[in-house]
């Protein structure tokens, strides 16, 4: 389960770069600048996949085994992860084109929400079926669980905001991705030390 | 054998997303809607690769070793798995274009049938050459073996139907993929429990 | 070394499918038929990568360790493996266009020859530096070594032939790939048994 | 951490080939020749990723464990590695188009510098937090550390030179990549032996 999952996570993350392209005409510098939505989409999607992988990997490290339902929930999660480069491309193009913005940003948000929700469902199922090894969960996994409701709430809020203000929604998706990736616990330790 | 195979399975599954594209003109919402054959093709192909991977992985987990013929049958299976994004793209475009539908849907069906058949051949060869560890096969592998003839039959039927009604054939390929991925045994247990 | 190498082998093999595309106009069936050079290129390149992977994997299984020169020769081999999708695309297009045929088929042949040669260099270096575990080499690796000079000779011959008859050269590359992948030893055993 | 990282390294390296394309019109030979910046970009980027992977792999081999900050620094490194195919494509096109050269070559250089710097930051953090196993570092890792300041200096110099002479900068990036990949220690041994 891990090799196939790690494969899909890393390939989906790396394929995101194919969504970045320059659109002539314009001077090279102007073209580079006007492609900022593509860089931004790359950043948000890469960090979201990265965060999902960190959570997934903290989870699988503690699994005793996998039953067949767990493998299937995992497969659906991977299906959505592997789909992410498509809405990312939509968003990259959407921010150029005010018409498409709202629809595309909404599709993007729903995809991000689904990834987070399925990651949570995977963990909840594994706990319910006692598929984890005994002993306390690692801190990474505990942080994951504490953060699930605020995160899902933030995504739903951002999706609703995006219906009126798509740009703000994308900024919120970025904020959530950064929040998920930042190791708050360690940063707190660092601050306490200093 | 496993790292290379898992690599091909996960890359082929993830490359499927590159087959999804919007075709202007039309409002963003219309473009998104009219791309439904691409989403559908992505879903069917991803689930088919997922099912093939579940079977493959249930198989390799129980192998004592691999002889050189097994490695070669595996290579041919991977050759067809890695080819799947191409007929998937054909189907995604075919459903827009009634002319191409029949031919492209048939090519797609034959590819799916071949994947299933080669997965079965791999297992049959390993059994024949006593390459498995002793003891009973896992339930995943047993379910796989029970389902092989109905599945191959369903594919052949769908291919023949597709010569007249290509849309129905694609719906059948979807049904087979869902059937293969659904963990019937566990669902029965869940129902018995409730 | 193995995870990165297996990654490059499986990704390069799977990316080959992106080189296959239909070229309108024409009926769907005509388009499918006229893309045969693309299928053929896919087949030859996939089998060549498959054969290189089989040899590579038979080799790495018996390595005690890797020194830094071995890692570098390996990196150059991977550089050429990862490059193969490009000349494969050239050949796919070349066979449509008689002008380009000779040049593109020659580039393709030189790439295939280089892959084979670097695989051999890797094994020769590992033997020279005593990087293998003691005991006799596996049959896969022994077959590999017996076949190296005939194979390199066949590639050089095919490249020279391709300067006059590019189509025949591609047929020869296919023959070499099939020869490399076929498990002659096992087939002999099968025939002796019957 | 290793499977996901090795995945991103090998996929980014292999995706580079998609940046190579011929641009008609012109005879096949002319087209092949005029695509030299694409081959050159492929070579420099592949070797740079290869060198980063060699360093990364020498590092992870000696890690006792990974804390959450290390995983995050690693994620940022992978984000830049996975981004590299985009500036590589820019450089491949830049060398045709004198207007774009300077800007695109600068973006490329900054990406290469960032990869090198983040690889160094990862190692520095692991040392600072005592995440390595006891005993002396391997020679690969020691060479890595000795080379870090000259390498970063060479990149900064090349970026500055590139503002006036972009072609020379690309030649310097190539020189750095070759320098990083060449196993100087072993070559010295080889020379001392002869």
Image (spheres, coloured by chain):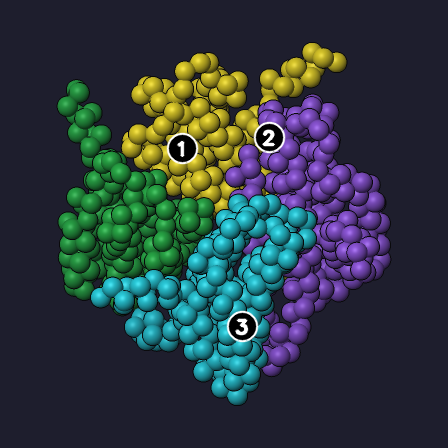
Chain colours: A cyan, B purple, C yellow, D green
* Residue nearest the observer in this picture, A6 or B81: A6
- Indicate left or right for A72 with D104 as reference: right
Residue C57 visible in the snapshot = yes
What residue sits 37% from the left and 66% below the top? A184
* Residue nearest the observer in this picture, C170 or B154: B154
Using a 10 Å C-alpha cutoff, classify the residue at mark 1 as few (fewer than 14 neighbours), some (14 to 19) or many (20 or more): some
Using a 10 Å C-alpha cutoff, classify the residue at mark 3 as few (fewer than 14 neighbours), some (14 to 19) or many (20 or more): few
Residue reaching furthest top?
Answer: C192
- Indicate left or right for C52 with D119 as reference: right
Residue C159 locus on image (x, y percent)? 45, 31
For mark 1, what is the residue? C114
Quarter of the rendering containing residue A190: bottom left
The chain that hosts pointer 3 is A
Residue B14 vs A98, above or below: the answer is above
The chain that hosts pointer 1 is C
Asked if badges 1 and 2 are on one and the same chain, I answer no
Local SS, label 1: helix
Looking at the rendered image, the disc whose residue lies closer to the viewer, 1 or 2, is 2
For mark 2, what is the residue? B71
User: Marks 2 and 3: CB-CB under 8 Å?
Assistant: no
Residue A157 locus on image (x, y percent)? 53, 81
Give the Cα separation between the discs numbered 2 and 3: 47 Å
Residue A156 vs A57, above or below: the answer is below
* Residue nearest the observer in this picture, B24 or B62: B62
For mark 3, what is the residue? A149
What residue sits 64% from the left and 45% below the top? B53
Local SS, label 2: helix
Residue D188 locus on image (x, y percent)? 17, 29
Local SS, label 3: helix
Give the Cα separation between the discs numbered 1 and 3: 55 Å
The chain that hosts pointer 2 is B
What residue sits 29% from the left and 33% below the top? C68
């Amino acid at each position: 389960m891990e090799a196939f999952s790690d494969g899909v996570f890393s390939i989906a993350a790396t394929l995101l770069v194919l969504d970045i392209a320059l659109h002539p005409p314009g001077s090279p510098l102007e073209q580079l600048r006007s492609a900022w939505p593509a860089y931004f989409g790359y950043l948000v999607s890469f960090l979201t996949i990265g965060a999902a992988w960190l959570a997934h990997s903290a989870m699988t490290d503690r699994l005793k085994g996998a039953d067949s339902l767990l493998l299937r929930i995992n497969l659906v999660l991977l299906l959505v992860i592997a789909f992410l480069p498509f809405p990312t491309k939509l968003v990259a193009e959407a921010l150029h084109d005010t018409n498409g913005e709202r629809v595309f940003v909404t599709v993007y948000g729903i995809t991000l929400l689904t990834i987070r929700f399925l990651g949570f469902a995977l963990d909840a199922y594994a706990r319910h079926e006692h598929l984890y090894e005994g002993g306390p969960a690692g801190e990474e996994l505990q942080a994951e669980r504490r953060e699930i409701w605020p995160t899902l709430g933030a995504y739903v809020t951002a999706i609703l905001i995006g219906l009126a203000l798509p740009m703000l929604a994308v900024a919120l998706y970025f904020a959530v991705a950064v929040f998920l990736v930042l190791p708050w616990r360690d940063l707190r330790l660092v601050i306490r030390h200093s």
